[in-house]
Amino acid sequence: MIDARKATVGESYVLYDAALGEPAANRWFDEAHWQREGQLLREKTGRGTVLVLDRGGEKWVLRHYHRGGLVSRFIHDHYIWAGLERSRSFREWRLLAALHDAGLPAPRPVAARVRRNALLYQADIITAYLPDTRPLSVYLDEGRPLAERWREIGRMLRAFHDRGVDHPDLTAHNILLDSDGGTFLVDFDNARLRPPGPWRKAGLERLERSLRKVALETGTSFDDEGWERLVAGYDEPAAAARRYGETRSVSGS
């Protein structure tokens, strides 16, 4: 079980895993600090910048929260303050901790930070790096055959849904695969726990649209047979439970 602790670090509020030690000042969230120490490994692009860090052999991912959509043209990375536990980073950190404790394949949370400025705040989150993984979209772009891995993706998604996890951005970019057959789900910003409902079907439909968009953008073909295998895997709740643990439930968020 992750031992969640809160601390005030300078003018920031930090939520962290006590097993990893208490954050020293704000250095954990400072890109310049990691650059000076030669521990900034690489950057990934997405909504803003994601940094991969090397902390004594253990790799972390640092992500700063940025606005999306039309509002991002006017407000880059500030959010309206509605309380610490309702901040983007604290909510995602607590959900990730619950997913980790339930044995689901999601990144382990390290620390979350909130910097408040009157009625606004900025946020960051650090999670453990998932080694030897690449997005499903990259596999598709390279034309790599996935065969039965489609079925495992479906089982993985069913395991999350059966625990009530509604992931609002279920796309080919947020499903990661490793070379040993592992399948993971990432980027739980704005995800939440919900009772069963039509959001499950909506999530799968969103993923199908994402896969078709990747095919269009990369000049590849949508894999109809692969999609059928994914749906078949999703329709195997008993297999998903055996693979990802049927007795451990998700709580909190």
Image: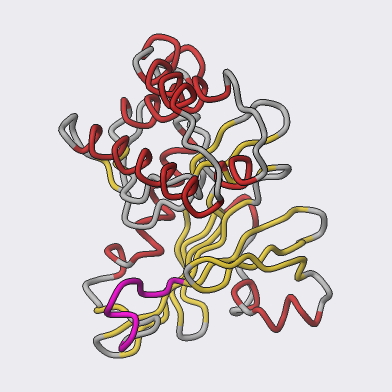
Residue at 65 percent across and 51 percent down: it is 129
Q: Is 87 within the magenta? A: no
Q: Quadrant of residue 26?
A: bottom right
- In the rendered view, tell whether residue 38 sits above or below residue 167: below
Q: Position of residue 165 (x, y in %)?
A: 32, 38
Q: Position of residue 127 (x, y in %)?
A: 57, 55
The residues colored magenta run 65-74
Q: How many marks?
A: 0
Query: Residue 205 or 22: which is nearer the viewer?
Result: 205
Task: Assign the magenta stretch its main secondary structure.
Answer: loop
Query: Residue 144 or 158: which is nearer the viewer?
Result: 144
Residue at 34 percent across and 15 percent down: it is 235
Q: Quadrant of residue 22?
A: bottom right
Q: Is 70 within the magenta? A: yes
Scheme of image coloration: secondary structure
Query: Residue 153 or 143: which is nearer the viewer?
Result: 143
Query: Residue 75 or 30: which is nearer the viewer?
Result: 75
| Residue 207 in the figure: left or right of residue 118 | right
| Residue 29 in the figure: left or right of residue 196 | right
Residue at 72 percent across and 81 percent down: it is 33
Q: Quadrant of residue 194?
A: top left
- In the rendered view, tell whether residue 229 sits above or below residue 219: above
Q: Position of residue 92 (x, y in %)?
A: 39, 55
| Residue 146 in the figure: left or right of residue 117 | right
Residue at 46 percent across and 53 percent down: it is 187
- In the rendered view, tell whether residue 89 sits above or below residue 81: above
Q: Position of residue 3 (x, y in %)?
A: 51, 47
